[in-house]
Amino acid sequence: MQCPYCNHDDSKVIDSRTSDNGIRRRRECIRCGLRFTTYEKVHRPALLVVKNDVRREEFSKDKLRDGIARACAKRPISYDEIEEMAADIESSLHDSGNGEVHSNVIGRMVMDRLRALDRVAYVGFASVYRDLQVIESFEEVVRDIREEAGQHSQMDGAPT
């Protein structure tokens, strides 16, 4: 590893720690003795998203995060929660071992997580994701949420 101070090609590792998706290493230059940090990240192969019209495009965590953020606009959901959700979905997709994933799978993953996090954000996302242009379709989504809320209340022993 080349020293960023003196450009010498040799350094020794003083400390290694795991960090988000990689390893953080503290190094010391053999020549000048100055210390610096390097990060090693696991390179994952590209993940392709198969669209409904069978086009394929590379998966973009930024695009996923932006879609989630739009659904959560004006909701009490922090940026960290949105980022964590996007990272969790990305990790699940990579862990599946598939090189390609259909966009419907990603949409369903987002909907499942939003449904558990915030019902209003879920309805907002569902209205775009499912292209709910017919009022009956929108009512169906809301009815599903109400039924789920009623089941949770019954399980908790609260009256419905």
Image: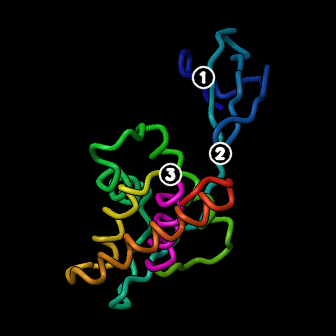
Q: Is residue 118 magenta?
A: no
Determine whether the residue tagged by mark 3 lies in a helix, strand or loop.
helix
Q: Bounds of the magenta span?
A: 103-116
Q: Residue at x 53, y 60 (%)?
A: 160
Front residue of 82 and 90: 82
Tell me the amino acid under the disc marked 2: Asn
For marks 2 and 1, the one nearer the N-term is 1
For marks 1 and 3, the one nearer the N-term is 1
Residue where numbered disc 2 is placed: 21
The x and y percentages for residue 148 are: 54, 67
The x and y percentages for residue 110 are: 47, 64
Q: How far separated are the C-alphas under marks 1 and 3? A: 46 Å
Residue where numbered disc 3 is placed: 117
Front residue of 44 and 38: 44
Front residue of 7 and 132: 132
Query: Is the residue marked by circle 1 packed among few (<14), some (14-19), or many (20+) residues within 10 Å?
Result: many
Residue where numbered disc 1 is placed: 3
Which tag is nearer the camera, tag 2 or tag 1?
A: 2
Q: Which mark is residue 71?
A: none
Front residue of 145 and 131: 145
Tell me the amino acid under the disc marked 3: Leu
Q: Is residue 114 magenta?
A: yes
